[in-house]
Image (tube, helix red, strand yellow):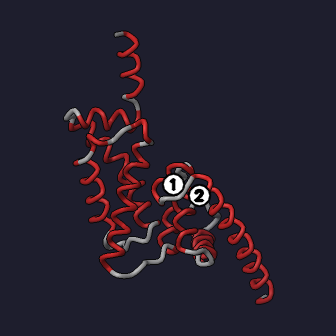
């Protein structure tokens, strides 16, 4: 029994622990869980191309769907965060199908751009605009991989399971995207020097 109790307290740490407690009906655990997930799901929704006007409803829908099916979450199959991202990806894809068009990720990825301190506000704006221009050189699939694997920092396995690609495929697409971004950055710097 001690071993089981020790394992039980180990499992009930972090988001997975909050999920287990929320499953048992602890409302405070559910509140803490969804408060922790809210900002990541919001940034993920924007990175995946959801309209900023639609994001609050989409995030609420994802959290509600996750809450309703929390009993099916299996921590042995992946992290809780990846599980919620899977719900998010499916909702966004379904939204695109319903709209009959694909939305671009470029401007939404800016929300997930690294939050480094820029010397001035103008430099921060310029860095985000540069990121948007560079990301426009990527295909839709590359932007999805960059959003989940590079920016949201999901593991290759988690990003792969969300996008239906093997972990090796995720790493390969990310490597190709980084090379394409590096080439685009060089071309952009060259064009900037020519303008001077």
Residue in the picture at 37% in, 16% down: 4
* SS type, badge 2: helix
Residue 116 appears in the figure = no
Distance from Cα at disc 1 to Cα at disc 2: 7 Å
Residue 2 locus on image (x, y percent): 37, 10
Residue in the picture at 60% in, 74% down: 138
Q: Is 8 on the left or on the right of 173, as rendered?
A: left
Q: Residues within 10 Å of mark 2 (few under 14, many from 20)?
A: many
Q: Is 96 on the left or on the right of 111, as rendered?
A: left
Vertical side of 126 occupied by 193: above or below:
below
Q: Identify which residue, 128 or 25, lies in the foreground.
A: 25
Where residue 173 sits, quadrant-wise, is: bottom right
User: Residue 170 shows which numbered tag?
Assistant: 2
User: Residue 159 shows which numbered tag?
Assistant: 1
Kindly indicate whether the residue at mark 2 contacts the one at mark 1 (C-beta within 8 angstroms): yes
Q: Residue furthest top?
A: 2
């Amino acid at each position: 029994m001690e071993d089981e109790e020790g394992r039980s307290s180990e499992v009930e740490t972090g988001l997975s622990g909050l999920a287990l407690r929320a499953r048992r009906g602890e409302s405070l655990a559910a509140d803490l869980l969804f408060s922790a997930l809210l900002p990541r799901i919001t940034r993920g929704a924007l990175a995946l191309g959801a309209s900023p006007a639609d994001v609050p409803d989409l995030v609420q829908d994802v959290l509600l769907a996750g809450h309703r099916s929390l009993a099916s979450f299996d921590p042995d199959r992946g992290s809780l965060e990846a599980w919620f991202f899977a719900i998010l990806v499916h909702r966004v894809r379904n939204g695109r199908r319903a709209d009959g068009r694909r939305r671009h990720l470029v401007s939404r990825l800016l929300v997930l751009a690294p939050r480094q301190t820029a010397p001035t506000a103008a430099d921060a704006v310029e860095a985000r605009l540069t990121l948007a221009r560079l990301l426009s050189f990527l295909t839709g699939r590359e932007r999805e991989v960059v959003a989940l694997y590079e920016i949201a920092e999901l593991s290759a396995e988690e990003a792969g399971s969300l996008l239906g690609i093997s972990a090796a495929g995720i790493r390969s697409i990310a490597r190709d995207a980084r090379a394409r971004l590096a080439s685009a950055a060089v071309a952009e710097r060259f064009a900037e020097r020519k303008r001077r």
